[in-house]
Image (cartoon, grey):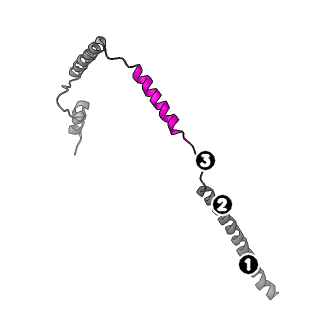
Protein backbone atom coordinates (compact mmCIF):
# COMPACT_ATOMS: atom_id res chain seq x y z
CA UNK A 1 0.00 0.00 0.00
CA UNK A 2 2.88 2.38 0.77
CA UNK A 3 4.35 1.77 -2.68
CA UNK A 4 1.01 2.66 -4.32
CA UNK A 5 0.72 5.85 -2.25
CA UNK A 6 4.22 6.86 -3.39
CA UNK A 7 3.95 5.78 -7.01
CA UNK A 8 0.46 7.17 -7.77
CA UNK A 9 1.35 10.86 -7.27
CA UNK A 10 4.61 10.33 -9.16
CA UNK A 11 2.78 8.77 -12.12
CA UNK A 12 0.25 11.62 -12.07
CA UNK A 13 3.02 14.23 -12.10
CA UNK A 14 4.78 12.45 -14.98
CA UNK A 15 1.54 12.26 -16.98
CA UNK A 16 0.82 15.95 -16.37
CA UNK A 17 4.36 16.82 -17.48
CA UNK A 18 3.93 14.82 -20.71
CA UNK A 19 0.56 16.44 -21.37
CA UNK A 20 2.03 19.93 -20.82
CA UNK A 21 5.03 19.14 -23.00
CA UNK A 22 2.89 17.93 -25.89
CA UNK A 23 0.44 20.83 -25.63
CA UNK A 24 3.30 23.36 -25.52
CA UNK A 25 4.95 21.55 -28.41
CA UNK A 26 1.74 21.74 -30.47
CA UNK A 27 1.32 25.42 -29.68
CA UNK A 28 4.92 26.15 -30.63
CA UNK A 29 4.52 24.22 -33.91
CA UNK A 30 1.37 26.20 -34.65
CA UNK A 31 3.20 29.46 -33.89
CA UNK A 32 6.04 28.44 -36.22
CA UNK A 33 3.53 27.72 -38.99
CA UNK A 34 1.92 31.12 -38.49
CA UNK A 35 5.26 32.87 -38.57
CA UNK A 36 6.13 31.06 -41.80
CA UNK A 37 2.87 32.29 -43.33
CA UNK A 38 3.80 35.86 -42.39
CA UNK A 39 7.26 35.45 -43.90
CA UNK A 40 5.86 34.31 -47.25
CA UNK A 41 5.01 37.20 -49.54
CA UNK A 42 1.34 37.77 -49.92
CA UNK A 43 -0.25 38.59 -53.24
CA UNK A 44 1.99 40.56 -55.46
CA UNK A 45 0.31 43.32 -57.36
CA UNK A 46 1.59 44.08 -60.80
CA UNK A 47 0.87 47.67 -61.66
CA UNK A 48 1.16 48.82 -65.21
CA UNK A 49 2.72 52.21 -64.53
CA UNK A 50 2.58 53.22 -68.17
CA UNK A 51 -1.20 52.64 -68.27
CA UNK A 52 -1.67 54.64 -65.05
CA UNK A 53 0.53 57.42 -66.43
CA UNK A 54 -1.44 57.52 -69.69
CA UNK A 55 -4.75 57.64 -67.80
CA UNK A 56 -3.59 60.53 -65.63
CA UNK A 57 -2.23 62.40 -68.65
CA UNK A 58 -5.51 61.85 -70.49
CA UNK A 59 -7.46 63.26 -67.55
CA UNK A 60 -5.17 66.30 -67.34
CA UNK A 61 -5.46 66.88 -71.10
CA UNK A 62 -9.26 66.68 -70.95
CA UNK A 63 -9.33 69.11 -68.06
CA UNK A 64 -7.01 71.59 -69.74
CA UNK A 65 -8.93 71.32 -73.03
CA UNK A 66 -12.18 72.35 -71.27
CA UNK A 67 -10.73 75.31 -69.36
CA UNK A 68 -12.17 78.63 -70.43
CA UNK A 69 -10.52 81.94 -69.68
CA UNK A 70 -12.45 84.14 -67.28
CA UNK A 71 -14.82 86.54 -68.96
CA UNK A 72 -16.12 89.94 -67.89
CA UNK A 73 -18.96 88.40 -65.85
CA UNK A 74 -16.50 86.36 -63.79
CA UNK A 75 -14.51 89.50 -62.97
CA UNK A 76 -17.67 91.44 -62.10
CA UNK A 77 -18.90 88.69 -59.75
CA UNK A 78 -15.47 88.53 -58.10
CA UNK A 79 -15.55 92.28 -57.42
CA UNK A 80 -19.10 92.05 -56.03
CA UNK A 81 -18.08 89.20 -53.77
CA UNK A 82 -15.20 91.29 -52.42
CA UNK A 83 -17.50 94.21 -51.61
CA UNK A 84 -20.05 91.88 -50.00
CA UNK A 85 -17.33 90.34 -47.84
CA UNK A 86 -16.10 93.75 -46.66
CA UNK A 87 -19.67 94.86 -45.84
CA UNK A 88 -20.41 91.68 -43.87
CA UNK A 89 -17.17 92.00 -41.92
CA UNK A 90 -18.04 95.60 -41.00
CA UNK A 91 -21.51 94.47 -39.91
CA UNK A 92 -19.87 91.83 -37.71
CA UNK A 93 -17.63 94.46 -36.17
CA UNK A 94 -14.45 93.21 -37.79
CA UNK A 95 -12.15 95.61 -39.54
CA UNK A 96 -10.39 92.94 -41.55
CA UNK A 97 -7.06 94.73 -41.33
CA UNK A 98 -6.47 94.58 -37.57
CA UNK A 99 -5.76 91.36 -35.65
CA UNK A 100 -8.57 90.68 -33.21
CA UNK A 101 -8.75 88.82 -29.96
CA UNK A 102 -11.17 85.97 -30.67
CA UNK A 103 -11.91 85.55 -26.97
CA UNK A 104 -13.21 89.12 -26.75
CA UNK A 105 -15.31 88.61 -29.88
CA UNK A 106 -16.91 85.52 -28.37
CA UNK A 107 -17.53 87.30 -25.06
CA UNK A 108 -15.18 85.06 -23.13
CA UNK A 109 -13.27 87.95 -21.57
CA UNK A 110 -16.44 89.02 -19.74
CA UNK A 111 -16.73 85.56 -18.21
CA UNK A 112 -13.16 85.64 -16.94
CA UNK A 113 -13.77 88.91 -15.11
CA UNK A 114 -16.75 87.41 -13.27
CA UNK A 115 -14.90 84.31 -12.06
CA UNK A 116 -13.59 84.49 -8.47
CA UNK A 117 -9.91 83.77 -8.03
Which numbered mark, 1 or 3, is in the foreground of this view?
A: 3
Front in this rendered view, residue 45 or 21: 45
Say which quarter of the image contains residue 95.
Answer: top left
Where residue 101 sits: x, y (%)? 21, 34
Q: Which circle marks residue 14 in the picture?
A: 1
Q: Is 44 within the magenta? A: yes
Residue tagged 3: 43
Q: Tell me what residue is drawn at x 30 percent, y 13 percent.
A: 71
Q: Tell me what residue is drawn at x 23 percent, y 43 percent.
A: 116
Determine the CA span between mark 3 and mark 2: 18 Å
Can you say whether 16 is above or below 78 in the image?
A: below
Say which quarter of the image contains residue 108.
Answer: top left
- The magenta-colored residue range is 43-69
Q: What is the secondary structure assignment of the residue under circle 1?
A: helix
Can you say whether 14 is above or below 1 in the image?
A: above
**Figure quadrant of the N terminus:** bottom right
Q: What is the secondary structure assignment of the residue under circle 3?
A: loop
Mark 3 neighbour density, 10 Å: few (under 14) some (14–19) many (20 or more):
few
Q: Which circle marks residue 33 in the picture?
A: 2
How would you classify the magenta stretch by its main secondary structure?
helix
Q: Specify which label sits upstream in the sequence, 1 or 2.
A: 1
Mark 1 neighbour density, 10 Å: few (under 14) some (14–19) many (20 or more):
few
Q: Is residue 37 left or right of residue 9?
A: left
Which numbered mark, 3 or 2, is in the foreground of this view?
A: 3
Amino acid sequence: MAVLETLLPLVCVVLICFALYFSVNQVSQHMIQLSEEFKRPQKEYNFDLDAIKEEILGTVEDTLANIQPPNAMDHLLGALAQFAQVKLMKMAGLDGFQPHDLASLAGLNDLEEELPE
